[in-house]
Image (cartoon, rainbow, N blue to C red):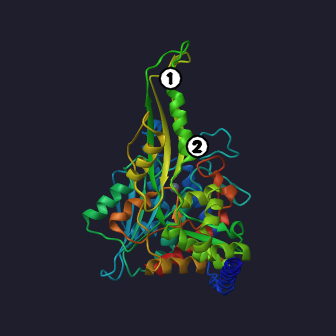
């Protein structure tokens, strides 16, 4: 009986402790924006994005390998549209198509900062679009077309920001590089950003910070938060396509031997789904929830503030939701399977591609070892070009604080939180020349808008483009 009272007492004390901890975790007040829009004309900005979208800079791979003219046209468009940037900044063309603008600062002792964007877009066959994908038409306050969101919107906002500042006679304290790569979209391509970084290295340039796309401005209500949430990617998951190969004598399909080749391969894929990599709280995800928790509704807040004690309860729930699952573990996505190319022939070899996004702290080799263990001896695992997760950029760095300040100065009712970027972008190539790499896309995209990226009817709002430009002006003034 005494033991029962002791257990109940301990349990009660624990609940009380967690309740008090939740109550005493106070919500910091959000900074107020200064409302300055620098007198920007949103219609002029929109017309520039329209023109940018009209130039079909589809990445030069596969059947678009000869798409060089679009990139020359895009360069000419930038020359014509941004006279101050082209007059004041030194422009270097890297590897034929990537563009680097270098604006000299007053203080050569400060490390330079860099703002990135990519000129290329994914292909967009016209079928299914409400408006032509390379028309750049405006409807209901949105600019439609391939690249409107990914990422000519951000590219235009970046260079508009610099054009505005230079037109006012502004000179940055530190040198600023604006780097527009030309092959971000094809995962295996290494012709743009990696070559820019090689060039920076050859000049012995180390960067104080890098700002690239990624992250987003989310509606916080999804997380029980009564504000917008500006997610800043402070690290990026690794990427690897693993090939599963099963080799077993084929033969005629009229008298198949068992188990068949494809049975073994399918079983391997099923086993991978049943035995994922473990879910983990990485330092960056802990920080994400630490920042968000005080702003959440009580039930969410209770769970997140007491995450250390309630992890056993929270993790299984979060891993059921694809987006939170993706920030807690390495994910496996079987994307392609190949067997025989003839209906009545058993394949002597079958293969499957498993696309993996590797959690911060794990490596390509560790994941390969896990997959090999799970799929067993009949299936061989191999991989080609892969990259490990990036290091985590600090949130106590001056650059992060200033970036956060610029976001808060620009957007109303905005909570800024660091997080793990689960996709990929050019920023990862800058790791050798920079410790403070942040991914932030200053556009408010609804879930519907996000689904349009790389898909049909991609778009960006005219008002959002202006906001994004204001953000870059604020960020450049604060960080440079
Ligand atoms: Zn992109």
Q: Which sits in the foreground, 170 or 244?
A: 244
Q: Secondary structure at mark 2?
A: loop
The spot of residue 421 in percent (x, y) is 52, 62
Q: How many other residues sit within 10 Å of disc 1, few (<14), some (14-19) or many (≥20)?
A: some
- The quadrant of the picture occupied by the C terminus is bottom left
Give above or below for 228 relative to 422: below
Q: Position of residue 9 (x, y in %)?
A: 69, 82
Residue 412 in sight here = no
Viewport quadrant of the N terminus: bottom right
Q: Nearer the viewer, residue 163 or 262?
A: 262
Q: Which residue is mark 1?
A: 340
Q: Which mark is residue 124?
A: 2
Asked whether mark 1 and ligand 1 are closer than 8 Å, the reply comes as no
Q: Is mark 2 within 8 Å of ligand 1?
A: no
Q: Give the spatial CA distance, label 2 vs label 1.
A: 31 Å
Q: Quadrant of residue 304?
A: bottom right
The image quadrant that residue 465 belongs to is bottom right
């Amino acid at each position: 009986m005494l033991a029962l009272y002791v257990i109940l007492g301990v349990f009660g004390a624990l609940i009380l402790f967690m309740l008090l901890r939740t109550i005493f975790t106070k919500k910091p007040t959000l900074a107020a924006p200064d409302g300055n829009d620098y007198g920007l004309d949103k219609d002029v900005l929109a017309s520039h994005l329209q023109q940018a979208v009209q130039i079909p800079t589809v990445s030069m791979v596969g059947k678009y390998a000869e798409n060089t003219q679009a990139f020359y046209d895009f360069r000419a468009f930038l020359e014509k549209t941004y006279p101050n940037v082209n007059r004041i900044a030194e422009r270097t063309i890297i590897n034929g198509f990537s563009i680097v603008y270098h604006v000299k600062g007053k203080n050569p002792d400060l490390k330079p900062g860099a703002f990135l964007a990519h000129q290329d877009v994914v292909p967009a066959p016209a079928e299914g679009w409400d408006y032509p994908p390379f028309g750049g038409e405006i409807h209901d306050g949105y600019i439609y077309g391939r690249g409107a969101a990914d990422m000519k919107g951000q590219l235009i906002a970046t260079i508009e920001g610099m054009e505005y500042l230079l037109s006012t006679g502004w000179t940055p304290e530190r040198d600023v590089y604006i780097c527009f790569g030309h092959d971000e979209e094809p995962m295996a391509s290494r012709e743009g950003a990696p070559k820019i970084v090689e060039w920076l290295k050859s000049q012995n340039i180390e960067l104080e910070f890098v700002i690239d796309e990624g992250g987003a401005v989310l509606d916080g209500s999804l997380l029980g938060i009564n504000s917008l949430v500006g997610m800043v990617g402070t690290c990026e998951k690794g990427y690897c396509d693993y090939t599963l190969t099963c080799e077993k004598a084929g033969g005629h399909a009229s008298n198949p031997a068992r188990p068949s080749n494809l049975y073994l391969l399918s079983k391997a894929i099923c086993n991978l789904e049943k035995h994922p990599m473990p879910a983990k709280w990485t330092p960056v995800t802990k920080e994400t929830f630490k920042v968000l928790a005080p702003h959440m509704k009580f039930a969410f807040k209770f769970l997140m503030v007491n995450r250390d004690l309630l992890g056993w309860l929270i993790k299984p729930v979060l891993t059921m939701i694809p987006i939170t699952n993706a920030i807690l573990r390495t994910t496996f996505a079987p994307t392609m399977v190949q067997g025989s190319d003839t209906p009545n022939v058993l394949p002597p070899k079958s293969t499957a591609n498993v696309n993996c996004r590797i959690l911060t702290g794990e490596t390509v080799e560790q994941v390969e070892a896990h997959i090999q263990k799970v799929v067993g001896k009949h299936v061989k695992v191999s991989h080609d070009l892969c990259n490990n997760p990036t290091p985590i950029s600090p949130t106590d760095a001056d650059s992060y604080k200033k970036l956060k300040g610029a976001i808060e100065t620009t957007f109303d009712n905005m909570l800024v939180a660091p997080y793990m970027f689960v996709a990929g972008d050019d920023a990862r190539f800058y790791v050798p020349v920079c410790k403070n790499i942040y991914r932030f896309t200053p556009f408010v995209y609804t879930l519907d808008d996000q689904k349009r990226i790389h898909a049909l009817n991609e778009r960006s709002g005219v008002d959002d483009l202006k906001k994004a430009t204001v953000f870059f002006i604020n960020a450049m003034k604060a960080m440079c």
